[in-house]
Amino acid sequence: MTSSFTPQDQDDAVPPPTFFADVELKLDAIDRLHNPDPDEFTREYVYKRRPAIITGLMDNWPAMERWDFDYFRKFFGDLDIHANIQNLDSKLILGQVGKFRAMKLEQLLDEIENDEEPGRANYLRAYPVHRMVDHYPELEEDYDLPDLVPNWADIRFPAKWRTGTRNPAKLFGLLLAKTFLNRGSGKKATRSEISSRMAAVMFVGSKGTVTPFHSDGMQTAAYLCQVVGRKRCYFVSPDQHKKLYPRAFRRQFGMAQVDYRKPDLDKQPLFRDVVVEETVLHPGETLYVPSGYWHAIEAMDASISYSHQIVNEDNALGWLTCIPERYLAQLYFKSKGGLRNVTGAKDWDDWA
Ligand SMILES: O=C(O)CCC(=O)C(=O)O
Ligand SMILES: [Fe+2]
């Protein structure tokens, strides 16, 4: 099917936040930095674990011109995917983000373009980018892998080691994580191999998609590079985690049990006191999500985003201590036939 729909045909009016009205919402609360100095950014945002929006990183990406739904239909239409079909009127929390249906990407794009139903949203959630690159190698010319902050999973570069710690257990842990994550660096690697190690993922969806509150798996930090459409981002600092009622015994993936749009305040009274930072991520902007920081993201327009994970000295020990739990979770979900009931299409075999 051909269509004249382009996601850029967006309504410039900013729709109101869908956040539950009775909590303190700090609007436009996230720092915006244009081409920051990498060392300063690492010191002020990575080590202090503050989210930020970075402008300038994507200025030379051909993706900004090329990526739209027609492009994805042309080169990736026949990809087999599991699309997340969200009923926005029902409760949405991590682990309960809606149904997943097997289809070709082309079918999902048709649904996104034709579906006018207000209470529904369709999402290709966290599809592994290395599979897209294997499918259509020219994709890698469309974008640069952001490398503002040290990333031991980025095997284009040898991992830097600049720790000041003298604690032998910490030193040993950091060395172990660095060696494991950065293995193979210095050798020639394909974009597909590099992307796979960093767990690079793509998001393609309709206006209205909701990613409920979570902190990223394995305590990684992440870049979220917005190519098409706007996304509204909500943040809750890690010290407020109790107010989100995280699922117990999960260090390796923070999953809130509150639906921020319609919380059950009888069962989740602490949520009333949460302080939320809000911002709008525009096309061409990159969101930096710190390790352990709670975030929820909703698409204000039809949207395309690229994301990859970051592990370095700041979060490597957390990453390491998550491995046993992640291993058990992986066994469990494999026995259930996949991970789709938790995050979507993210396949843990692709991670490190
Ligand atoms: O954009 C989204 O829907 C979710 C992005 C996200 O939370 C992530 O990449 O960790
Ligand atoms: Fe996330």
Image: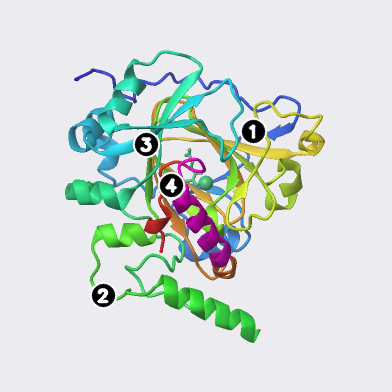
Name the residue carrying label 2.
Answer: 187
Q: Which residues are magenta?
A: 322-343
Q: In front: 251, or 331?
A: 331
Mark found first going from the N terminus, 2 or 1: 1
For disc 3, the marked residue is 82
In the image, 102: left or right of 318? left
Disc on res. 117 = none
Q: Is mark 3 within 8 Å of ligand 1?
A: no
Q: Earlier in the sequence, mark 3 or mark 4?
A: 3
Q: Identify which amino acid the numbered label 3 is placed on.
A: His
Residue 338 - label = 4
Residue 127, x across and y down, in percent: 36, 44
- Label 3, label 4: how many angstroms apart (C-alpha)? 11 Å
Q: Quadrant of the N terminus?
A: top left
Circles 4 and 2: CB atoms closer than 8 Å: no
Q: Is residue 279 magenta?
A: no
Contact (CB < 8 A) between labels 2 and 1?
A: no
Q: Which residue is mark 1?
A: 27
The Cα atoms of the two marked residues, 3 and 1, are separated by 34 Å
In the rendered image, is residue 228 in sight?
no
Measure how far apart labels 2 and 1 are at the Cα level.
45 Å
Give neighbour class at mark 4: few <14, some 14-19, many 20+ (Cα, 10 Å). some
